[in-house]
Amino acid sequence: QQQVKQSPQSLIVQKGGISIINCAYENTAFDYFPWYQQFPGKGPALLIAIRPDVSEKKEGRFTISFNKSAKQFSLHIMDSQPGDSATYFCAASSRDTGRRALTFGSGTRLQVQP
Amino acid sequence: DAGVTQSPTHLIKTRGQQVTLRCSPISGHKSVSWYQQVLGQGPQFIFQYYEKEERGRGNFPDRFSARQFPNYSSELNVNALLLGDSALYLCASSRIPGQGEMAFFGQGTRLTVV
């Protein structure tokens, strides 16, 4: 019940296109959903996050859409650029006995072609 | 401000040996979490510490242990290394455990067990 399922595993998008990555979860106790971007040899960097009381959050070219009833959330990258080529992880956490461990998806390797 | 710093960056150990990884959190952050990231997968939660006390533990064997020091830095110890322990070990810091969502990761320690 702690799993977060992420798709697709890899994604190729043309420069200027829209990249869409989807995640689904089972644990209804999850109440925080961040997305992380990871470049090779680096640690994950927090990109954008959402709480379930909001259906959408936008920060620059990055938008999270959240569907609480379907227990799904997605990341949209508008006007994708070659510099966006990285691995993206969705994650979720819950207010569980005072700790907030992050449960990560398996990752999506995004390649933006020039 | 310095981000989360981890040392060493790379490490090669032999099966059966013991290893200690170190993490210094962002200044002002009192909570440190450790994650294991196997190649091609998302990070998996190992431990969370706050104010020198363990606040959470993931599904890892007792060979894994950690501690936090008065200056909030932390060490992760792994005994009796197995080949399967080869991974990127990530440290994340946050102000308090309840704000685990604002978790900032270091670049990790790449451990190779041969």
Image (cartoon, coloured by chain):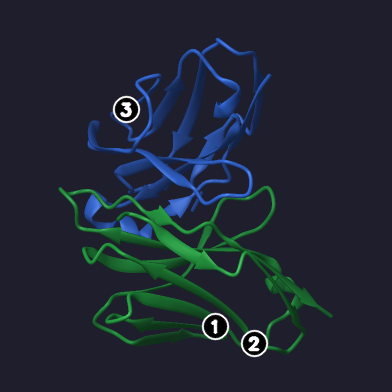
Chain colours: A green, B blue
Element class at badge 2: loop
The picture quadrant where one finds residue B7 is top right
State whether residue B51 is above or below residue A71: above
The quadrant in which residue A107 appears is bottom right
The chain that hosts pointer 2 is A
At label 1, the amino acid type is: His
- On what subunit does the disc labeled 3 rest? B
Q: Which residue is mark 2?
A: A18
Task: Please name the residue shown 33% across and 75% down the image.
Answer: A71
Q: CA distance from mark 2 to mark 1?
A: 7 Å
Judging by the rendered image, the residue that carries numbered circle 3 is: B69
Residues at marks 3 and 1, CA–CA distance in whole angstroms: 40 Å
Q: Provide residue B85's location: percent of width, then percent of height.
A: 55, 27
How busy is the neighbourhood of tag 2: few (under 14 within 10 Å), some, or many (20 plus)?
some
Q: Position of residue B28 (x, y in %)?
A: 33, 49
Residue that sits furthest to the right in the current view:
A114
Query: Label 2 to label 3, Cα distance in Å?
Result: 45 Å
Residue type at mark 3: give it.
Phe
| Labels 3 and 1 within one chain | no
Label 3 SS: loop
Question: Residue B82: x and y, percent?
Answer: 55, 19
Front tag of 3 and 1: 1
Q: Is residue A7 left or right of residue A15?
A: left
Query: What residue would you read off at disc 1?
Result: A76
Are the residues flagged by discs 2 and 1 in contact, CB closer than 8 Å? yes
Q: Is residue A78 left or right of residue B50?
A: right
**Sooner in the amino-acid sequence: mark 2 or mark 1:** 2
> Do the residues indicated by labels 2 and 3 lie within the same chain of the protein?
no
Q: Secondary structure at mark 1?
A: strand
Pick the front one: B57 or A42: B57
